[in-house]
Image (cartoon, helix red, strand yellow):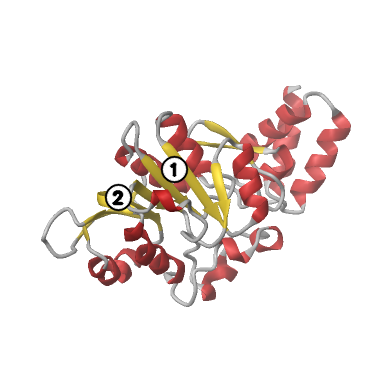
Amino acid sequence: MDSSRNALAELLADNGFVAADEEADELLARAAGDQELLVAMLERRLTGEPLAWITGTVEFCGLAIRVEPGVYVPRWQTEAVARRALERLPEDGAAIDLCTGAGAIAAALRAGRPRARVVGTDLDERAVACARGNGVEAYAGDLFEPLPPELAGRADVVVGSVPYVPTPELALLQRDTLTFESALSYDGGADGTGVLRRAVAGSPRFLRPGGALVLELGAGQPDALAPDLDRRGYRDVTVIRDEDGDVRGIEATLGNSSRSTSIID
């Protein structure tokens, strides 16, 4: 078994997969000794198809998240945003997860706050069905549009991994990304902030005073969003960084002070 596993890992590495050892383990676990299934899965992976679509799951914040083919695959980089959102969510609070995809952030919030109400939205009907399969209360529609009206002014947290890649930079994404996944999951417009600005603009309607907006974004975008956050009454904007110091998101509080918006980095 060790020799077969090593050979599988070596084949994946030779084809450019940087986490070859981990991927070999996942494929072997999913195949569970079925050699025909293993070969079929390997052939799919070598085309660049996302591993989570092949095995059916991905780990996110310690949870096994089911991911159906065609649905955006949650990334580990988003975990920092999910953890910050969880910190801001009271035990019996309410949270809204924009562009929920497979429901990874929402599922992490539900796991950490079982008594809280967590609602997700997504444009993609396939994603909504997948999120519901992961136990998420999910609705199909654009950002805030499909939310139940009773959530207006009552959410403690609005969180989202919305599209934020600048359109000119889509071609720089990891190879085969857009061969399989939709550009809709990535394309944030000319400077990457198009959907982010809409999320900022729509969130005050649903957040309670003192509630938190937590959004995933990229380097340079916190400064670009500062005027929008200030205009909508957000204060105490903090940049979220991962363990390597890379920018992963922002956290802002709605109307909790009279100070103008300043970014704490």
Q: Is residue 117 above or below residue 236?
A: above
Q: Tell me, yes or no, if residue 130 can be seen here.
A: yes
Q: Which residue carries the number 1 mark?
A: 79
Q: Are marks 2 and 1 in contact (CB under 8 Å)?
A: no
Q: Secondary structure at mark 1?
A: helix
Quadrant for the C terminus, please.
bottom left
Which amino acid, by three-letter code, is at mark 2? Ala
Q: Position of residue 232 (x, y in %)?
A: 27, 66
Please tell me which residue lies in front, 83 or 171: 83
Residue at 59% x, 70% y is 171
- Image x and y of residue 174, in percent: 60, 59
Residue bearing the label numbered 2: 212
* Structural crowding at the residue carrying mark 1, measured as other residues with C-alpha within 10 Å and reported as few (<14), some (14–19) or many (≥20): many
Residue 262 spot, x, y in % from top left: 18, 62
Residue 46 sits above or below residue 36 on the image = below
- Total numbered labels placed on residues in the image: 2
